[in-house]
Amino acid sequence: QALKATTPPRSMLEVRRLQLDQGALQTALPLSLLEEIWRHLSASRRSIAELFSFCSVSELKIQQAVSELLRTEHLSLIPAPTPSLNLTPHE
């Protein structure tokens, strides 16, 4: 739950670095998972929820991989837009 709080599933992710720097990564997660997420996000911005449908591992592993890529500044988190309220008076 703590991972979901720091990276809400609807928030968009985008790539910050041109290449995946394996030397900066300090995780026991499979490099293949990190590379797969990197490839999907290199193609276009996506939410974590979208990554759940692309990757064939648990949501927890995806959350952990995204957290590591955010920590090492490979990715940026773009907050999900909040719904705007229409505050115009009714006539």
Image (tube, helix red, strand yellow):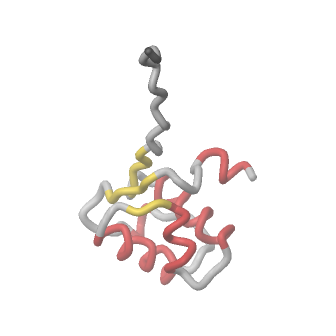
Q: Quadrant of residue 84?
A: top left
- Looking at the figure, which quarter contains the C terminus? top left
Q: Is residue 72 above or below residue 28?
A: above
Residue drawn 44% across the image and 79% down it: 36
Q: Reply above or below: 85 against 90.
A: below
Number of residue marks: 0
Q: Position of residue 65 (x, y in %)?
A: 55, 66
Point out residue 34 in the picture as x, y percentages from the top left corner: 48, 74
Q: Residue furthest left?
A: 18
Image location (x, y in percent) of residue 18: 24, 63
Which of the two residues, 10 or 32, is positioned nearer the viewer here? 10
- Identify the residue at horizontal 29%, vertical 72% (top origin): 43
Name, please, the residue furthest toward the front: 91
In the rendered image, the vertical position of residue 30 relative to residue 51, given as above or below? below
Seen from the viewer's position, the closer of residues 60 and 29 is 60
Q: Residue at x 50, y 68 (%)?
A: 50
Residue lying at 67% horizontally and 53% vertically, measured from the top left: 3
**Residue 81 appears at what percent x and percent y?**
44, 41
- The foreground one among 91 and 87 is 91
